[in-house]
Image: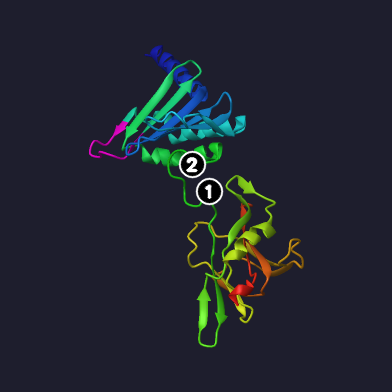
Amino acid sequence: MKKVLPFLLLLFCIIFLSSCTRRDDIVKLSYTTIDYMGGISITHIIDFEKNEYSKNYSQPHVKEGTETISVSTFTDEEERIFIEGINKCGLLNINEEYEDPCVLDGGGWNLVVEYSDASTFTSTGSNDAPTKVFNACSTYFYDLCSESVLGMLPKYYVSPPDISYSFHYNTENSNVSTNGLTRTRIGNYKWNKKESLNNDYYNINEELKVNNSFKNNYNYKLVLYTSNYDYDERFTNIEVTQYDYNEKMTNKNEIYNGKWFKQIELDIEMNKIYIYKISYKNGDFFEMTFNTFVNMNAN
């Protein structure tokens, strides 16, 4: 027994190390979804030799549009994090087949993992899937491919939450509260490893101003409130800045700087560009913009 035990331990170590090496030796991963109603299929291809993510769309009886299109590339470090992540989530240990025979339409999927020794791991599903595993892997796929591929991403993983806004003003007959006087749009942001910086706020607001219905004969207040904010993490700071409505956005004026709040009311002026920046403790932030350009046809 004393001689057998070391042998079994050595065998276990060899198998374990072999398994680890095999998992790190993936050369390609393909994930295909099929819509049973229309027959359209989308194949997502992650090539770890080319460090490239690509997609292929195909439809029955249609030869055109089946070309594989390169979507994005990734680094060796991003590859390492991805493979470690899907290993941790158990994607390479799911069953070979999932099926719900009670559902007649719906869709199917096929996962193929190719290794450097030419072996493969394949798993397929028809109206059934290892949902918990797929959802757990969703962020790793998104971080590598820069788009949603497999599973459901956590809420606000791709886009940051906004805070609610409205405009208050008084008329001769009533007090009005509405968010229909203009539209807001996201500008610069850094969010979950993605970022978009150096956006042109003047051009953004040139597009937004066609939606405006402000009038010169009213005094408006911007009301920001967090009663509808449903993101788990609260922001740590908010800055509201005002600019003249011109291409150079002159006369920058910070009209508010504070922390988490329930509601704030700020006096605003006409024919201005406004930006409010919301920041988080991890360094993530996003900026929303709107303008109070007065369309003279609205007066």
Relative depth, front residue between 9 and 251 = 251
Instruction: Of the two numbered discs 2 and 1 on the same chain, state the one appearing first in sequence.
Output: 2
- Location of the N terminus (image quadrant): top left
Q: Disc 1 marks which amino acid?
A: Val
Which percent across, then down, holds residue 202? Answer: 69, 60
Q: Is residue 200 magenta?
A: no
Look at the numbered discs 2 and 1 and tell me whether their residues touch, using CB distance below 8 Å.
Answer: yes
Label 2: state its secondary structure.
loop
Q: Residue at x 57, y 67 (%)?
A: 182
- Label at residue 148: 2
Which residue position holds label 1?
A: 158
Which residues lie in the magenta part? 98-108
Q: Residue at x 33, y 37 (%)?
A: 107
Does 187 sit left or right of 115 as displayed?
right
Q: How many marks?
A: 2
Relative depth, front residue between 258 and 31 = 31
Is residue 125 positioned above or below 218 on the image?
Answer: above
Q: CA distance from mark 2 to mark 1?
A: 9 Å
